[in-house]
Image (cartoon, coloured by chain):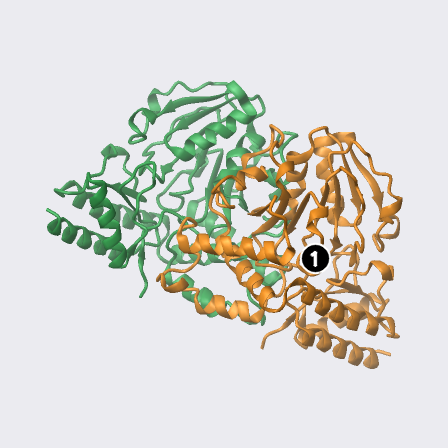
Chain colours: A orange, B green
């Protein structure tokens, strides 16, 4: 029986995508080879990369003067790539709204020292809110402003993005890319590890305004230079890319287009999250501590107030086929990650289970 | 029909491994989830990483004081990681025996400038041989000596490795790791993109003596620091690893143990390569230009002497189910990559086809 999988990442993939991949795992498009066995320069594989890029451009309405890259190393590697590509004057502003935002900032400090500044943080309340973006004093001479659009561990998200004038805005969108409409033209760079909303782990998406990426720092490794992957004819194929992850990403993106695009996904995601938050807010047992305005529609943390009861919940939920609900160690309790691929039925099944658990544990 | 796939990388995988992966792609070990959907911190996935590491240690007889890591970015990324982890005095010696060896050297120059030296090269004869390692004047104060054990494009390999005294020897073994017995203790660091002999593209193996990797350069990105992935309890799980590629690597390694280990693989590889070289050497049509002593047992380039005939060969071979035989653009002609996963039958089928082609094109 297929589980409802609420893992934060790697996370659930659309069943139809997995079924298609399974069907052709030994014979990709009549080649007599697996997609994992063909050269990345094989025309059939290059067509996969090109379609994936075109789909992403279409879904996110990415302007033509932006590069769209599929790279390796996860968002954690981009934490270094950002300063190594953009920090020409050793200055950058970071908004620290969670664990990964903090790691991105710390990596900025490696290259900028004191020039990398934490200009706003929600650490004072264990990251349960997002600082008011209108009240942040940004540095006009910063090389960029960095933020994390959705905080996987703490279940918060930016609902508005700051105005940073001429300073490029850089966003780690690992946990909410393709979940809601975003005006890409407002960002200098967007990056996202794909293992939450797009594909199996191993591929990272980078969307970068080309005018910003022409002149990486001299110490930047060739593979971390975004322009390396954006060269004429390179198309993310400078070296062997993570082919299987890109192949699955392509199937996922194709499905999103079929389902009506991001606008439609956002509606469904708002609906799914709404069902769950409504239930929690009216529950006598479960609580969510995030400031309502900033609640993530991708990651929903909740607690019972008792560690024992939390553990019991996770255990019984697992037995009922609702898996990977244990919260992150920094927060405790439970967390339901309800990415694009989580069907409405999964959220409803979770709520039914929570109701039952609440009744049984009064 | 399954093709005999002679691609240089990504390349053919053992059919039995693909079949096992296909069978459980929707339900990994009864979890009700795909292996691509479970958390990398799930015990069942951590067991996969641990088994893969243990298998590699056992197969290659890796000493305990060496770290074994599964990272991302391919060998190309390691070209930077090598100096960023080891180049403490800005000095390194490179042996340049092909395209990738040259790229590794050029990346060394980014960090070492003139201190990164090409101490030997076979560029004078288009990389058709390996310089005599006993005649190379190494620098006693170099931070490391770098070489490429097997040259995928040119079809050469080191048959002996240089004595470098106290200077650590670093080897890119992307295209011959696990194909022949190697004394790991003679190397400071071995790295290999896995997409040739081990797994689908997306995972890179690093084997590094722990005493050498404690103090990376300050400018080294956290994700490129080998010690990041070797921390207590990290076990290549500092961030989300390329799970699917590691999962397949584990199945491939398990199979190698079942088949009798590297010693046995080396015998088969020598046998396969011997059949092909013998045929070529006795052919009136096909030739291999590599100095015999240094011929690779993994990548066998050959030509007819006529570009037209080469093209005809590749086309007709493809139609006969012998695919990806086109040579690299730097060499032309044909290339048969015959990694561990290429069955003896595949090599015999190629030879039969070559015989027929020779007769038909006299």
Q: Is residue B240 left or right of residue B7?
A: right
- The residue under the point 41% across, 66% down is B19
**Against A2, is B339 above or below?**
above
Residue B290 occupies quadrant: top left
Nearest to the observer: residue B339 or residue B187: B339
Q: Quadrant of the N terminus of chain B?
A: bottom left
Q: Is residue A274 left or right of residue B3?
A: right
**Against B194, is A36 above or below?**
below
* Other-residue count near label 1 (Cα within 10 Å), few / some / many at <14 / 14–19 / ≥20: many
* Residue that badge 1 annotates: A176
Q: Chain of mark 1?
A: A
**Against A63, is A111 above or below?**
above
Give x and y (percent) for residue A229.
Answer: 53, 41
Give x and y (percent) for residue B163.
Answer: 40, 26
Nearest to the observer: residue A97 or residue A56: A56
Q: Is residue B361 left or right of residue B96?
A: left
Task: Give the tally of numbered discs.
Answer: 1
Nearest to the observer: residue B347 or residue A313: B347
Nearest to the observer: residue A211 or residue B357: A211
Give x and y (percent) for residue A178.
Answer: 66, 59
- The residue under the point 72% across, 36% down is A108
Residue A263 occupies quadrant: bottom right
Give x and y (percent) for residue A313.
Answer: 76, 72
Q: Is residue A148 left or right of residue B312?
A: right
Q: What kind of element bears circle 1?
A: loop
- The residue under the point 61% across, 31% down is A215
**Against B127, is B7 above or below?**
below
């Amino acid at each position: 029986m297929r589980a409802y999988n609420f893992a934060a990442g790697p996370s659930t993939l659309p069943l139809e995508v997995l079924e298609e991949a399974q069907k052709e795992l030994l014979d990709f498009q009549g080649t007599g080879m697996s997609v994992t066995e063909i050269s990345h320069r094989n025309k059939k594989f290059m067509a996969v990369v090109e379609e994936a890029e075109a789909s992403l451009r279409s879904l996110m309405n990415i302007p033509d003067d932006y590069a769209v890259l599929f790279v390796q190393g996860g968002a954690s590697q981009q934490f270094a790539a950002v300063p190594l590509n953009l920090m020409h004057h050793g200055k950058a502003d970071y908004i620290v709204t969670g664990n990964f935002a903090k790691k991105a900032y710390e990596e900025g400090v490696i290259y900028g020292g004191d020039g990398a500044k934490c200009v706003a943080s929600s650490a004072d309340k264990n990251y349960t809110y997002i600082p008011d973006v209108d009240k942040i004093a940004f540095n006009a001479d910063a090389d960029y402003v960095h933020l994390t659009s959705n905080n996987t561990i703490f279940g918060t998200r930016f609902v508005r993005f700051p105005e940073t004038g001429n300073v490029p805005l850089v966003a780690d969108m690992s946990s909410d890319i393709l979940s809601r409409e975003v005006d890409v033209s407002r960002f200098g760079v967007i990056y996202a590890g794909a293992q939450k909303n797009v594909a199996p782990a191993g591929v990272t998406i980078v969307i970068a305004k080309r005018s910003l990426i022409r002149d990486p720092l001299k110490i930047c490794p060739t593979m971390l230079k975004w322009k390396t992957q954006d060269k004429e004819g390179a198309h993310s194929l400078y070296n062997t890319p993570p082919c299987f992850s890109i192949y699955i990403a392509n199937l996922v993106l194709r499905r999103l287009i079929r389902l009506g695009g991001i606008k439609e996904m956002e509606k469904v995601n708002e609906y799914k999250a709404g069902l769950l938050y409504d239930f929690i807010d009216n529950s006598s047992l479960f609580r969510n501590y995030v400031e309502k305005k900033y609640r993530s529609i991708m990651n929903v943390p909740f607690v019972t107030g008792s560690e024992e009861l939390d553990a019991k919940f996770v255990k019984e939920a697992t037995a009922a086929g609702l898996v990977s609900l244990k919260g992150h160690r920094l927060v405790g309790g439970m967390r339901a990650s309800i990415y694009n691929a989580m069907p409405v039925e999964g959220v409803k099944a979770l709520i039914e289970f929570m109701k039952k658990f609440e009744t049984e544990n009064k």
